[in-house]
Image: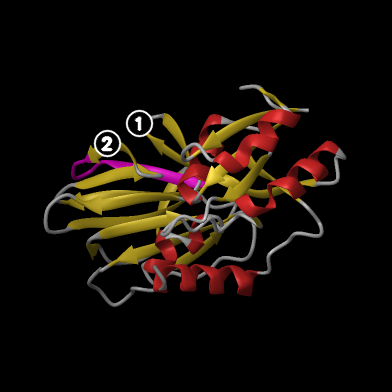
Amino acid sequence: MKVKIVKKQDYKELKPIYENFEISEKGDICIAIGGDGTFVRAAKEYSGPILPIRSEEYGSIGYYSDLSLADIDFVVKNLKSKSFTVEKLENKIEVEYKSKKYYAVNEVLLHNVLEEVNFKIYEIKNGKREEIYPYTMSGDGILVTSSIGSTAYNKSAGGPLILIPNAICLTFLNVDGPYRNSIVADSSKTIEIEVVKYRGALRYDGIDIRELKPAESFRIRVSNEELKIVRFNNKREALAKKLDRIIRSRMTK
């Protein structure tokens, strides 16, 4: 088996991986060692199945990792015997701006450049825009995630945890107005967000796309690009345990 490695830094614990597998940019799987940022990086560099492994540094969450560096021998044994499954984790979010498309793993963000950004939200139906909210939203911006990113920035912003696949969640960031609750839409929806007043920085997974001026807009939808993950049936971390681990990691240095 050939493996691609994406890592936060060099780890001595990875020696058995190098000794037992051929390392290749075109590996059969990608092993991502680090935290969630490393996982997102791997998903951008590699289109095949990814095996995330936590590096356990302070502040490095590794939400999608069932395994840590302490499990390397287990990983080697089960990869060699092909005792694993490849599962679809989620589809990436497609961002369309001026006919160019970008694919987000964690989130799409429209954020204020100065004090605030004013924007409106539409659903595209039969090629036409239909208002979702009857008001212009004013505040720090809006965050768009799928189930993957719902546990990251979205959770910190007060948005819901999404446990269903192929959904998009829109969470407002410190907005004024009568409606402040998050919106959850299924994969059939195409949402358009238009800047009405002031400017907003459009980003995906921390990467800048463009600073939008009034009357400029972008569209978001669930893409056809799948994110696949490698799992071992006898090494699956339950959701409650993951959340407990994340909370404890932020409480303890």
Amino acid beneath label 1: Lys
Residue 152 or residue 180, whichever sits in front = 152
Q: Is residue 195 left or right of residue 52?
A: left
- Quarter the N terminus occupies: top right
The reply to whether residue 87 is in sight is: no
Residue 163 or residue 84, whichever sits in front = 84
Does the segment drawn in magenta span residue 9?
no
Q: Position of residue 123 (x, y in %)?
A: 45, 54
The residues colored magenta run 212-222
* Figure check: 140 above or below 36: below
Circle nearer the N terminus (2, 1): 1
Q: Is residue 40 left or right of residue 232?
A: left
Which residue occupies 71% across, 29% down? 19
Residue 217 or residue 250, whichever sits in front = 250
* Figure check: 65 above or below 12: below
The reply to whether residue 171 is in sight is: yes
| Numbered mark located on residue 98 in the image | 1
Assess whether mark 1 and mark 2 are in contact (beta carbons under 8 angstroms): yes
Say which residue label 2 marks: 210
Which residue occupies 27% across, 36% down? 210
